[in-house]
Image (cartoon, rainbow, N blue to C red):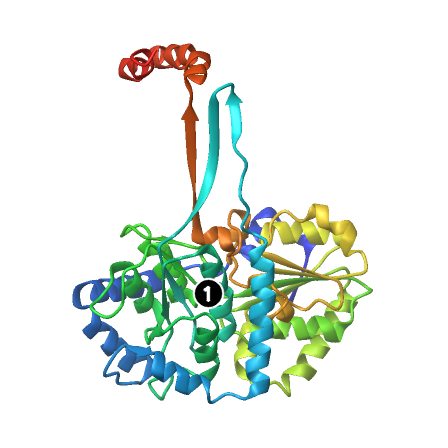
Amino acid sequence: MLKQYSYAGLTATDIEQLVARNTDATHTIQDTVSQIINDVRQRGDQSLQEFALKFDKVKLEKLYLEREDIEALAATITRDQQRALEIAFQNIHKFHSSQLRKERVVETMPGVACWREVRPIEKVGLYIPGGSAVLPSTLLMLGVPARIAGCKEIVVCSPPQHTGKINGFVAYCLQLLKIEKIYLVGGAQAIAAMAYGTKSVPKVDKIFGPGNQFVTKAKSMIQSMVNVSIDMPAGPSEVLVVADHTAQPAFVAADLLAQAEHGPDSQAVLVATSATIIKQVNAELKKQLEVLPRAEIATMAIQNSYAVEVADLHEALDFSNQYAPEHLILETDEWKNLLPRITNAGSVFLGHLTPESAGDYASGTNHTLPTSGYARSYSGVSVDSFVKKITFQHISPDGLRHIGSTVETLAELEGLHAHKNAISIRK
């Protein structure tokens, strides 16, 4: 079960090693991804078809599905399943719609008006994982804010299933989002295809989506190789649960396993205020694993995870902020008092009845979040991720009189006389 550490006994170096994850010290992942990127760049569609055969065990005649195929696949799911996806879509849309705000014009000096206006990123690429688990929820999490932002072209890539197609759930989400084409490309090769473009897959301006270590490495590498940006390093997934004596061990274990079943490289960390809680949670983990369909995957992730015993909740938040988790769950009655102490986290789940699963699917917040400690400097995906904010300014004759001498003086002291002249010639 979870390896156990005492926070009091950890040195700064110990903590640094504990909070480090998904490192690639031998550059094995980087070297593999570099080869994939170069192959896709040079050989395009042919490379993608060969990778589909190698990794997905599917021979593809064409690398995409269009509207008729999508409609047929969407029709294979039940009305209850459709309704669940519709509710998730509506909640995600409602939450993200509130993020588009028009900013006011600011007059910094009389006659000098400055403001910002929002413009959508024109071409965006959405990567939807589809390895051991297909994630239609991720398509909603990325597609909804892209639609709200007004992106003109939305390119969706997801690995093909053994049938050479996608499942009905992803297809129905495509219909909800009014997206009529999906590209059957997965892994690092999908990131490369959207970054460089191939005969089938369009080149995009920004790439979004979570994935395994290979996908995340590809995203990190690609933005330094070609004129394309990314949302953030997102994946493999992780959770940190803070628990005190008010927590229910069964709930805590369920939350840890909900994360662990994503994949063997996921991490689930427990920070508890006593060794007793850790012992009780370990017992629950064992019990719940016995009936979990993805027990083998979850077990490997749990072996990659650990528990930390702390003296109190303040110490728990100290460790959490150093870890900077993608998901932070506070399973304590005292969660309100802890909010001001949270400085680094992708998304936070408060109290005993707020599992991460709610945010993963349908509460409305986005589940594409920074991992591997990047919550120290990145936010999760939002409508802001899909737009640019352009500044505008207008200077009237009165404004030129007010600001002119200031600009002339500053340009002169920097030795940039053409800058000064651009003002002087107007005066």
Q: Which residue is mark 1?
A: 143
Can residue 43 be seen in this snapshot? yes
What is the quadrant of residue 329 in the picture? bottom right
x then y, percent, for residue 25: 39, 58
On the image, the x and y values in percent for residue 379 come to 53, 51
Callout 1 secondary element: helix
Q: Is residue 159 above or below residue 341?
A: below
Q: Number of callouts in the render?
A: 1
The residue carrying pointer 1 sits among few (fewer than 14), some (14 to 19) or many (20 or more) residues within 10 Å by Cα, namely many
Vertical comparison of 131 with 293: above or below = above
Q: Residue at x 40, y 15 (%)?
A: 407
- Residue at point 56% right, 49% down? 13
The percent coordinates of residue 354 (x first, y second) are 71, 67
In the image, farthest residue toward the front: 397
The residue located at (35%, 74%) in the rendering is 182
Looking at the image, can residue 305 be seen?
Answer: no
Q: Report the residue at 23% width, 83% height from top.
A: 61
Farthest residue toward the left?
A: 42
Q: Pick the quarter of the image with the C terminus.
A: top left
Kind of residue at badge 1: Gly
Indicate whether 104 appears above or below 303: above
Left or right side of 359 for 421:
left
Q: Is 374 situated left or right of 224 in this image?
A: right
**247 or 13, which is in the foreground?**
247
Q: Residue 227, position in %: x, y?
A: 28, 50
Image vertical order of residue 181 relative to residue 327, above or below: below
Query: Where does the N terminus fall, quadrant-wise?
Result: bottom right
Q: Is residue 410 left or right of residue 300?
A: left
Drawn side of residue 101 relative to residue 250, left or right = left
